[in-house]
């Protein structure tokens, strides 16, 4: 019996010593594991111990309407509105935008933070704790590279939709190729390939980023474009390092159709007689913005008889353009004002002698009317010679990618074949 007691005491002593030797190590491991546990953050705020309610602003709902529902008193709301003015005007809260209310997770459910999302990326935090504080924040944007291609059966926009691509990419391409492709002359069977960025916030798609490279097949020609940054300025160039920009845009408005072309003998739709029509008519809805196709000085902005409201721009000693039948002039447009390429100089209308809303666009060279669709515009500055090696390396990479891509045909075009 005595031997059994001694044995039990000996085993206990061993266990005690082992336990003492292991405790510091286990304590260290526990501390390390605890250190690795990161708090859950929302808008930079730890929310693990909080109740978070996320909703969307309803129509005709103001800050007071929202916070009163969560038992925030009028006095606090008034302080919030006044102190936030330098940072964010609460009157700019818009229906449909998302907000989050963060409360204590107890029976009181006291509001500690109110966060309003100004846009998918920007938000404002109202801190309602000890002293009211307001600050702006920005969510991290994730950039993902993507590719798309398509064949046009009706329009570039429709081709994007049919291929389940954000149709805003059509706008991006029309900007890139605005100087080199006449988008009013797009033909069935024209095609495109694009390498571009998609932007995500918290795995939610928020829009199109930068287009890295593109290929467009139009009127039997291949048009490549590549985005390249030099001297901190990015622009688009072709495979020979020439700028995609030109002195003049191909057209003075976007996404419309040509209803009448340049002619020396056209049957006038109102007068029913044949006479020259030295311009191009673009059919478009009233109010469609009209852009200056190049830099210049406005030499006429008035209502002129059959031409209706007209803006005339002198670009240099050789070229002048005119924009007829406008519904109204652009902001600040008057004789003597300098305008830049792409600036809104007016809006489509039907003033003067006109059967319906359209823009009559005219192009003059040395005072003589020429067909705007046949004007060849010189390019802007090419890639600087000092940057050519880097540019051609980049072109080789993206051109290989573009050339290896298969063009997806639209459902309408595929059905017709």
Image (cartoon, grey):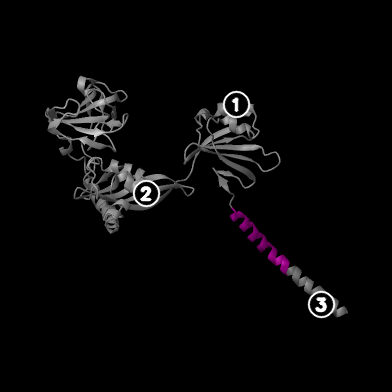
Cβ–Cβ below 8 Å for labels 3 and 1? no
Q: Which of the two discs, 3 and 2, sits closer to the camera?
A: 2
Q: Looking at the rendering, which quadrant does residue 366 occupy? A: top left
Cβ–Cβ below 8 Å for labels 3 and 2? no
Q: Which residue is mark 2?
A: 165
Q: Quadrant of the C terminus?
A: bottom left
Looking at the image, is mark 3 or mark 2 earlier in the sequence? 3
137 versus 411 height, above or below: above
What x and y, as percent, mark residue 236? 27, 44
Quick check: is 254 in the magenta stretch? Answer: no
Which SS type dominates the magenta stretch? helix
Q: Looking at the rendering, which quadrant does residue 10 occupy? A: bottom right
Q: Which residue is mark 3?
A: 7
Q: Who's the residue at 59% across and 30% down the image?
A: 65
Q: Who's the residue at 28% across and 31% down the image?
A: 290
The secondary structure type at the circle numbered 3 is helix
203 versus 123 height, above or below: below
Going by the picture, which residue comes out furthest to the front?
272
**In the rendered structure, which segment of residues is drawn in magenta?**
18-37
Please name whichever residue, 39 or 120, is drawn nearer the observer in this view of the structure.
120
What x and y, as percent, mark residue 159? 32, 48
Quick check: is 29 in the magenta stretch? Answer: yes
Q: Which residue is mark 1?
A: 78
The secondary structure type at the circle numbered 1 is helix
What x and y, as percent, mark residue 233? 31, 41
Please name whichever residue, 55 or 241, is drawn nearer the observer in this view of the structure.
55
Going by the picture, which residue comes out furthest to the right?
1
Q: Who's the residue at 36% across and 44% down the image?
A: 167
Query: Marks 3/1: CA distance?
Result: 77 Å
């Amino acid at each position: 019996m005595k031997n059994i007691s001694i044995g039990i005491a000996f085993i206990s002593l061993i266990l005690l010593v082992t336990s003492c030797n292991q405790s510091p190590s286990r304590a260290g491991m526990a501390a390390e594991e605890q250190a690795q546990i990161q708090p859950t953050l929302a808008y930079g705020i730890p929310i693990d111990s909080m109740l978070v309610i996320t909703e969307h602003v309803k129509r005709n709902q103001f800050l007071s309407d929202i916070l009163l529902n969560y038992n925030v008193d009028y006095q606090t709301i008034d302080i919030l509105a006044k102190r936030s003015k330098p940072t964010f005007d609460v009157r700019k809260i818009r229906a449909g935008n998302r907000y989050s209310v963060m409360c204590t997770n107890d029976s009181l459910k006291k509001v500690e933070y109110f966060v309003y999302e100004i846009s998918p990326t920007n938000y404002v935090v109202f801190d309602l704790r000890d002293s009211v504080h307001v600050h702006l924040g920005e969510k991290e944007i994730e950039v993902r590279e993507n590719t798309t291609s398509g064949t046009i059966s009706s329009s570039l926009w429709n081709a994007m939709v049919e291929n389940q691509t954000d149709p805003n990419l059509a706008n991006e391409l029309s900007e890139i190729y605005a100087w080199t492709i006449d988008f009013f002359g797009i033909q069935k069977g024209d095609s495109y390939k694009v390498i571009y960025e998609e932007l995500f916030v918290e795995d939610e798609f928020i829009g199109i980023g930068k287009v890295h490279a593109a290929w467009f097949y139009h009127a039997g020609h291949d048009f490549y474009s590549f985005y390249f940054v030099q001297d901190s300025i990015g622009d688009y160039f072709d495979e020979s390092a020439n700028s995609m920009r030109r002195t003049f845009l191909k057209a003075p408005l976007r996404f419309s159709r040509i209803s009448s072309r340049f002619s020396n003998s056209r049957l006038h739709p109102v007068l029913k007689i044949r006479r020259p029509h030295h311009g191009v008519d673009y059919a478009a809805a009233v109010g469609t913005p009209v852009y200056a196709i190049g830099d210049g000085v406005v030499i006429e902005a008035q209502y002129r008889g059959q031409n209706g409201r007209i803006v005339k721009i002198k670009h240099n000693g050789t070229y002048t353009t005119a924009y007829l039948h406008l519904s109204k002039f652009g902001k600040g447009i008057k004789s003597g004002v300098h305008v830049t390429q792409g600036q809104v100089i007016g809006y489509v209308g039907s003033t003067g002698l006109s059967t319906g809303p359209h823009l009559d666009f005219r192009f003059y060279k040395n005072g003589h009317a020429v067909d705007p669709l046949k004007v060849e515009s010189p390019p802007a500055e090419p890639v600087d010679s000092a940057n050519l090696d880097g540019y051609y390396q980049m072109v080789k990479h993206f051109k290989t990618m573009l050339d290896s891509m298969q063009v997806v045909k639209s459902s309408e075009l595929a059905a017709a074949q």
